Image (cartoon, helix red, strand yellow):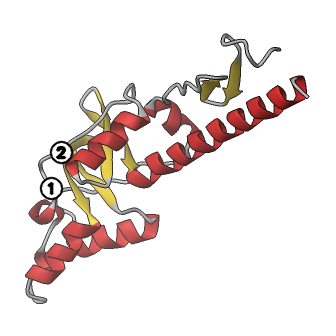
Amino acid sequence: MDPKDRNHRYDSGPFAAAFFGVIVIAMKIAEFLAHSNQRLVTCLPDDLLHAVAKRMYRHEIGAMPVCELGTRMVGIISERDLVRAFARADWSEMQYIRARDVMATRILSCGPDDTMRTAQELMRINHIRHLPVVKDGQVQAMLSMRDTLALRLRESEDEMNVLRDVVAATRHQNP
């Protein structure tokens, strides 16, 4: 195959790059989730804050949807929400504070057909680090800024490899 042929595609897993144009086809969130080992962890609005904190610690997550009636999301609780609650409350009150008392209710979300870059941009613009993936009113998963950055790094590495291969092929053709 001639690397100068603009129709030639370099297969790079879920996205592709074209020689001499390096076009990256953005990965859909659904595709990312299908390849990740992510498991949705939620809590109920009436869960006590110490139980929520323990669940987040046990699953090594920084935020989780607060859901009722299965996966109908009514809020999100994050590490920041926990810290604010601990800082504001009297220690004697801590045992009575529930997820509903500290969760964020202004919920931004994305859908499985959105791209990972769209999700990253939504998080960046709104200064948030976690974004629920919602389909038909039901939360499907949570994306983190870390997820999007790891994918962007992989895309950049793939683009670099394509360009390195193009340069090597060009040098080989024109000694």
Residue 8 visible, this angle: yes
Between 130 and 102, the residue placed more toward the observer is 130
- Where residue 128 sits, quadrant-wise, is bottom left
Instruction: Name the spot of residue 78 as percent of width and height, x first.
Output: 26, 62
Residue 69 visible, this angle: no
Q: How many labels does the image show?
A: 2
Secondary structure category for the residue under label 2: loop
Q: Residue drawn 55% across and 24% down?
A: 23
- Residue type beneath disc 2: Ile
Q: Residue drawn 27% across and 26% down?
A: 136
Instruction: Name the spot of residue 9 as percent of width and height, x first.
Output: 68, 18
Whether residue 61 sits left or right of residue 42 in the image: it is right
Secondary structure category for the residue under label 1: loop
Q: In which quarter of the image is the C terminus?
A: top right
Between 1 and 152, the residue placed more toward the observer is 1
Q: Do the CB atoms of the residues marked 2 and 1 lie less than 8 Å apart?
A: yes
Whether residue 2 sits left or right of residue 76 in the image: it is right
User: Which residue position is annotated with label 1?
Assistant: 104
* Circle 2 Cα neighbour tier, 10 Å, few/some/many (<14 / 14–19 / ≥20): few
Q: Residue drawn 29% across and 47% down?
A: 123
Q: Residue drawn 21% across and 64% down?
A: 47
User: Which residue position is annotated with label 2?
Assistant: 107
Eyeballing the image, is 46 above or below 12? Answer: below
- Residue type beneath disc 1: Ala
- Where residue 57 sits, quadrant-wise, is bottom left
Instruction: Name the spot of residue 111 as percent of width and height, x first.
Output: 33, 30
